[in-house]
Image: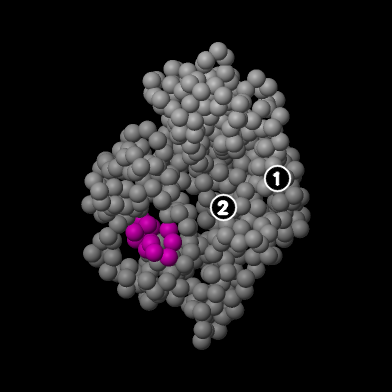
Amino acid sequence: MTDEPLKKTPLNEVEHELGGKMIDFGGWELPVQFTSIIDEHQAVRTRAGLFDVSHMGEILVKGPDAQALLQRSTCNDVSKLEDGRAQYNGLLYPTAGFVDDILVYRMGADDYFVVVNAANTDKDFEWLRECAKGMDVDVTNASADYAQLALQGPNSEKILQPFTNIDLSKMKYYRFARGKVDGVDAIVSRTGYTGEDGFEIYVAPSEGPRIFKKLIATGNVAPCGLGARDTLRLEAKMALYGNDIDHSTTPLEADLGWIVKLEKGDFMGRDVLEREKSEGPKRKLVGFEMVDRGIARHGYPVVDGSEEIGVVTSGTHSPTLKKPIGLAYLPLDKSVPGTTFMVLIRGKEARARVVPTPFYKRK
Amino acid sequence: MTPEDSRYAKSHEYVHIEGDIGTIGITDYAQKELGDVVFVELPKVGAQLEQGDELGSIESVKAVSELFAPVSGEVVEVNEALSEKPELVNTDPYGDGWMVKVRVSTPEEADELMDAEEYEEYIEKEAGK
């Protein structure tokens, strides 16, 4: 897109040392894999894997109107949060399309820590500032102040506990705490993007490499790249901004009705969502499996004869199910599990079937 | 490590010719670039290929890539083992991970392809991009 040099996370050098196969991911140099996507995927499903997600953005929202700003600009109900709790949410335009999907951490009644997608950080920051006009709130882009590590997999708690003074056994899903990790200030949340148990750890950039290396040195953690992150999140049917959701898709179309709280009062896109809720959205994001051979990938058209009726937004080979899976927008009447439809895979029609999601749920 | 007895295309296929039979697959460099191969689509026996024709596709977890015929000829055998074990392309690209055998119709086409040394120089340049 541009000739600007790739941005590097604080973990860049470590990733090179560990043999990461580096790629350009939205302007960031990040590892797509260290050994193999399938091996790294299985490590997270069965043991533990460690991801560098320092490219993610962090935006601080502080002040008397902090909650009011988030309530106005997002669709989930931020007032339901308590200190130490995190919430998945949608930052929306007045059209109800996604500016981004975000995590909102409540640090205090007027103090929120918002984690956003890397490529959207500047846009989100500008949008929040725009929405904040006339309000008593400070919006700060603090992305450069944090390295973020994601330790994911069933053994995560056991592996991380010796490094932290936070009692992880007491931390429930989507909770977080501030404490020490390897002796330095950290935010640790029981969250992730893999469908597995695990933690996300926020520390100062200078501390990231040492902690990353120490966790790997336990011998129980596989360094993992973006490739496994994508197959893991897709099995868990977690949306990827830019693939499955964007400015043109609403949370209801994206089957994210659980983050739409119309009763909380007015917010960006509420009228659109209210109408969609009563009339039903025109299209819906569904999970599918291939009936015919092949993998239907992002952007492949869904066809009915000569008519294009939908589009595949994500598709891959599922390492857990050992078959091709994907997500697609389909007309509402074709979105029922069991319905079959045709995808154009490089010009050839291949049959796929709508299936219930998530594709994978941990026990 | 790049076998000396084969010829190489810029699109990273190799052809190993014995008599009039050319065995075609992808190089070690190509399999590493692709990552875990999960599905290989190959032509039917009897298909007539011209040099540069798309002869199939390789799906890895992260991407799909096309396979092009490095030489012209008729397909005489396809590697059926790959439908059950596509990972052979990763573990043994020059051996059990071969893809198709063709009866080479125009042997001189192979001369236009790179030899092992030229190919290694070529991928070094590719990697440095």
Left or right: residue A67 versus residue A183 is left
Judge whether B84 appears above or below A67 on screen: above
What type is the residue that disc 1 sits on? Gly
- Please give the label number shown on residue A141: none
* Magenta span: A245-258
Looking at the picture, tell me which residue is in the foreground, A265 or A341.
Answer: A341
Question: In the structure shown, which secondary structural element does the residue marked by tag 1 occupy?
Answer: helix
The residue that label 2 is drawn on is: A190
The quarter of the picture where residue B77 lies is top left
Left or right: residue B73 versus residue A185 is left
Output the chain of dot 1. Answer: B
Disc 1 vs disc 2: which is toward the camera?
1
Looking at the picture, tell me which residue is in the foreground, A122 or B115.
Answer: B115
Output the chain of dot 2. Answer: A
| Residue sitting at x 51%, y 36% | B60
The quarter of the picture where residue A109 lies is bottom right
| Residue sitting at x 61%, y 41% | A33
Circle 1/circle 2 CB separation < 8 Å: no
Disc 1 and disc 2: Cα gap in Å? 40 Å
From where the camera sits, is residue A59 visible?
yes
Left or right: residue A12 versus residue A103 is right
What type is the residue that disc 2 sits on? Arg
- Please give the label number shown on residue B128: 1
The quarter of the picture where residue A323 lies is top left
- Majority secondary structure in the magenta region: loop
- Whether the magenta-drawn stretch holds residue A311 is answered as no
Looking at the picture, tell me which residue is in the foreground, A251 or B25.
Answer: B25
Judge whether A65 appears above or below A239 on screen: below
